[in-house]
Amino acid sequence: MKILITDKIEDEIIQLFKNAGHAVTYNELDADTLLREVSKFDGLLVRSRTKVVTDVVNMGAKGNLKVIGRAGVGVDNIDVKTASKLGIKVVNAPTGSTVSVAELAFGMMLSAARSIPQADRSMKQGLWEKKTFKGVELSGKTLGIIGVGRIGAELAKRAMAFDMKVVAFDKFVKKSPIPKVSLVSIDKLLKESDYISLHIPFVKEEGPAIREAEFEAMKNGVIIVNCARGGVIDEKALLKYLEGGKVRAACLDVYEAEPPVFKDIVNHPKVICTPHIGASTKEAQIRAGTITAEQMMMVLSGKTPDFWVNKQLMATV
C-alpha cells in the first residue's frame, strides 16, 4: 500500500511502514499539491499542520484513500463527517500524549504556586525581589480535576504524590479511575478546590465550561490550569477575576484563538502561558506517530482499529 505523510514525523515511524511492506512518501505538501496528489495513496498520515478539508477528502475518495491517521488526539483539522460519508476511516492516537500533557499541567501548577517564571524574569533583569515572590504550597491543598479521563487520571497520581487531596468531576464517568480520587458535583468541586485543572474537550454548541457563574462559585485565591482545549474557559471572564484578585494565577497552554489574539490575557502578570506545547515532547511525538501508524496498518490489512474516530458516524451514514 502507498502511504503519504505530510507533516514532520520521526524516522522510526516511516520505518514502521516500510518494515510492513508499505511504500512511503514523506513530503510536507502545500494545500494545492495535496489536493492533486492525495488520490494516489491508500493512507494519509498528518499531524496538526495539514488541513484535510472537504475537497481533499473528496479527491482522496475518488482514488485509493482508505484511511486518514492523525498522529495526536484532536481531529479538528480533518473533515471527519465527509470522510465518514465516503467510507474513509479516521484513526488517531489518544494515548500518545497523556503523560506529557499531565506533566505540563503539573509543572504549571508548581510554577504558578511559586511564581517561578516571574521570579526568573526578575532575576534576569538584575533585580533581587525576594519579598515579592511569596508563594503557596501544593501539599495539603485540594486539586479539582474537571474531566478525569486518561490525562486527568495521570495528573491526579502526581498530585497525590505531593500530598494533595484530589476531587474530580466528569459528566461521562460514573466510577473514579483512582480509588483515592472522589467524584463530586461541579458545584462542590468549584467551592472546595484550591487548584483547578481542566481536561475536557471544547464543545462549540455548549460554549465555555468556565464562565462568570463558575468563577463566582470558586474559592478566593484559586489557581487555574488549562492544558486541554481553547474555549473551555471564557478568557474575558478570567481576566475579570484575575484583576479582581479572586483568581490568584492562571496557567494556559491553549487559547480561544491560536495564536492568541486576546493579548490582555497573555500579557497579564498573573498568567503563565505556553504555545500549545502539551504534546510537544520527544517521547509523546514518537508514541503518537507509532500508535497512528499501527492503527492505519490495521485498517489497510482489513482489521478493526482500536482508535477508530468515526466508527459510530460511519455506521449512521
Image (cartoon, grey):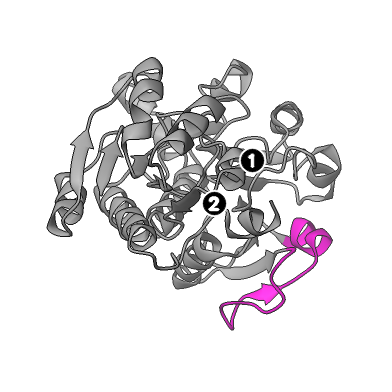
| Residue extending furthest toward the front | 62
Of label 2 and label 1, which has the lower sequence position? 2
The numbered mark at residue 136 is: 2
In the image, residue 304 sits, relative to residue 23, either above or below, namely below
Q: Which residues are magenta?
A: 171-192
Front-most of residues 269 and 199? 199
Identify the amino acid type marked 2: Val
| Residue 188 forms part of the magenta stretch | yes
Question: At numbered mark 2, what does the secondary structure look like: helix, strand or loop?
Answer: loop
In the image, residue 182 sits, relative to residue 90, either above or below, namely below
What residue sits 39% from the left and 59% below the top?
A: 299
Percent x, y of residue 143: 61, 61
Q: Is residue 101 left or right of residue 21?
A: right
Q: Is residue 302 left or right of residue 183?
A: left
Percent x, y of residue 32: 39, 16
> Which of the two marks, 2 or 1, is nearer to us in this view?
1
User: What crowding class fits label 1: few (fewer than 14 Cα within 10 Å), some (14-19), or many (20 or more)?
Assistant: many
Front-most of residues 103 and 209? 209
